[in-house]
Image (tube, rainbow, N blue to C red):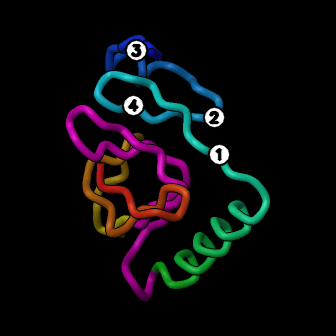
């Protein structure tokens, strides 16, 4: 049986993981950084959202930490935020949409 080590939130937030990792209920989880086609799709969506950001009133970020619950921090490939929302080093307001390996994330 595999065991894992719990990492305190403050340690996770101060760490410099390369690539960045998710933090789920105290466990640091490596994420799929993607390759090739994944990267092309990510760039396509970022470009699409950036092209319409003023029209749609949005801001787009890539691979930025998002707190989805008190004990969960995720690193979505792409997140779309309201342009009127706060600018934060860690997104703490619910994104309009977010994609993690092109599956919607909820927690």
Does dot 1 land on a helix, a strand or a loop?
Answer: loop
> Label 1, on which residue?
33
Task: Give the label, 4 or 3, closer to the camera.
Answer: 4
Disc tally is 4
Does dot 4 land on a helix, a strand or a loop?
Answer: strand
Q: Residue at x 47, y 62 (%)?
A: 99
Q: Upstream in the sequence, badge 2 or badge 1?
A: 2
> Label 2, on which residue?
19
Determine whether 62 is above or below 88 in the image: below
Instruction: Return the x and y of residue 14 as percentages of the image width and height.
Output: 45, 19
> Label 3, on which residue?
11
The circle on residue 23 is 4
Question: Is residue 103 a member of the stretch shown in magenta?
Answer: no
Q: Upstream in the sequence, badge 4 or badge 3?
A: 3
Q: Are marks 3 and 1 in contact (CB under 8 Å)?
A: no
Report, in whole angstroms, how far the alpha carbon at label 2 lies from the one at label 3.
Answer: 16 Å
Q: Are marks 2 and 1 in contact (CB under 8 Å)?
A: yes
Does dot 3 land on a helix, a strand or a loop?
Answer: helix
Instruction: Return the x and y of residue 16 as percentages of the image width and height.
Output: 56, 23
Q: Nearer the viewer, residue 36 or 62?
A: 36
């Amino acid at each position: 049986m595999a065991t894992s080590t719990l990492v305190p939130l403050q340690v996770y937030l101060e760490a410099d993981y390369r690539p960045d990792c998710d933090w789920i209920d105290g466990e640091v989880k490596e994420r799929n950084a993607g390759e090739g086609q994944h990267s092309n799709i990510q760039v396509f969506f970022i470009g699409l959202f950036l092209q319409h950001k003023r029209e749609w009133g949005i801001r787009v970020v890539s691979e930025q930490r998002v707190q989805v619950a008190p004990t969960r921090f995720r690193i979505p490939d792409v997140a779309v935020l309201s342009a009127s929302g706060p600018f934060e080093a860690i997104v703490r307001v619910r994104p309009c949409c977010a994609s993690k390996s092109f599956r919607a994330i909820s927690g």
